Image: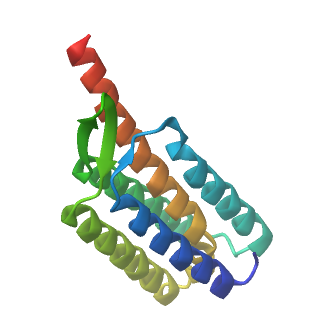
Amino acid sequence: MENPLVAALVAVAVLALVLTRQLRERPVAGRGFTLPLVLSALGFLTLVQAHPPVTALGVGLAAVELAVVAGFGVLRGRSVQLFVKDGVPYQRGSARTVALWVLTVGVRIGLGVLAAALGAGALTEATLLLSLGISLAVQALVVQQRVAGWARIDG
């Protein structure tokens, strides 16, 4: 996926799917890491194939971006509503989850614009799918930890 436009379109489609799925009531399952791992792998592959110019500034901005989207993953994971239905933990995203997704995307775009203005745009463009995968993985991890905390309290 060397074309940044293709990566962006894939990211938009995946984000629409993720948002739709997160707003539905569904069981908290251990499979919550499949999509984030696939996106992270695709993102890493895209980064390797793109051969963007690597500068200290670009690496720094990419690191900041990944840290920021991971932070938003934590916040979204905490915003997900958890409840028990028929003895099974369920989850459903809230209005706060959607607002945090909007902020995640807005900050990601803002960092991309900043990187482009500073001459490091190619590297941050190449990390789009990687950052989405990491953000989703962190969110899933937080949800899993919250549910695991219930088991420790009950056990």
Indicate left or right for 154 with 138 as reference: left
Rendered residue at 72%/68% (across/down): 46
Residue 108 occupies quadrant: bottom left
Rendered residue at 46%/55% (across/down): 136
Q: Residue furthest top?
A: 155
Rendered residue at 52%/78% (across/down): 12
Q: Position of residue 112 (x, y in %)?
A: 47, 80
How is the rendered protein coloured? rainbow
Q: Quadrant of the C terminus?
A: top left
- Nearest to the observer: residue 107 or residue 75: 75
> Taking 72 as reference, is 121 above or below it?
below
Indicate left or right for 18 with 78 as reference: right
Q: Residue furthest right?
A: 49
Q: Quadrant of the N terminus?
A: bottom right
Q: Position of residue 21 (x, y in %)?
A: 43, 62
> Taking 151 as reference, is 2 above or below it?
below
Indicate left or right for 16 with 10 as reference: left
